[in-house]
Amino acid sequence: MDILKAHQTELVIGLAVLVVFQFIFMLGLSGRVKYVRKTLRTLLTGPTGEDLEAQLKRCLAESSRALGRCDEMDNRIADIVADMTTCVRHVGLVRYDGYGDVSGKQSFSLALLDGNNNGALITGLFGRTDGRCFGKAVVGGQTEQGLTEEEDAALQMALAGGVATGNTSFAAPSLNGKRRLLK
C-alpha cells in the first residue's frame, strides 16, 4: 500500500491519459458506427423512403404482374399463330405472254395459298383485242380443273413458298389463242 501512496500522482496522471485515449478511441468508433448506420439506412431504404421489406414486396408484386402479362402475351401469340394458318402465306407468280400477238409478259398466273395450302389460282390472259380472267379453287394444294403450264408453275412456286422473279419464260402459243392444259 505504501507503494501506491508514494506513486499516487503518477498513477492518477497515467489513468487520466488512458481515459483520454479511450475517449478519443470511443469518438472514432462512434463516428464509424454513425457512418455504417447511415450507409445501412441508405442501402435499406429506397429512393422513395420505403424500407427493404416494402421494396421486396413491391418488386414481388411487379414481378407477378409481369409474369401474368407474359402469360397473356403467350396466349395472344398462340391465337395469332392459329389465325395465321388461314391467311395468305404462300404466293406464286408467273408472268408470260399469253397470246402470240402480245409481248411484254402482260399475262399472269397467281397462286395465293394459306398455311393449309388452300386458296385460289388466278390467271389473267391479255391480248391485243381482249382480256380474260380465270379463277380456280385450290384445296390441299390441288385443283379440280386442269392447269396450264404457267398455272402449274405458279402453284408449285406457292407450294414451295417462293415467288417467281419474272424471269420464268414460257413459249408463246400460236396466234389462234388456244391454250394447252396439263391435266
Image (cartoon, grey):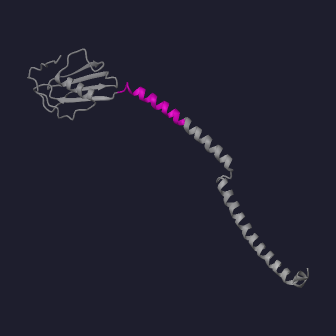
State which quadrant residue 160 falls in. top left
Q: Does the magenta stretch include residue 176?
A: no
Is residue 109 among the parts visible in the rendering?
A: no
Percent of width and height locating residue 55: 65, 47
Q: What stretch is highlighted in magenta?
A: 69-87
Above/below status of 33 relative to 129:
below
**Residue 9 point in image, percent of width and height:** 87, 84
The answer to which quarter of the image holds residue 35 is: bottom right
For image coordinates 56% across by 35% down, the residue present is: 68
State left or right for residue 112 relative to residue 15: left
In the displayed structure image, the side of residue 69 where residue 161 appears, left or right:
left
Report the predominant secondary structure element of the magenta stretch: helix
Is residue 74 part of the magenta span, yes or no? yes
Quadrant of the frame with the C terminus? top left
The percent position of residue 23, horizontal first and vertical second, equals: 78, 73
Please tell me which residue is depicted at 58% across the width and 41% down the height of the picture: 63
User: Which residue is depicted at the point 8% across and 23% down?
Assistant: 175
Q: Could you tell whether 59 is left or right of 165 in the image?
A: right
Is 10 in front, or is 20?
A: 10
Looking at the image, which residue is at 48% across and 33% down?
Answer: 74
Q: Where is residue 25 in the image (x, y as percent from the top left)?
A: 74, 72
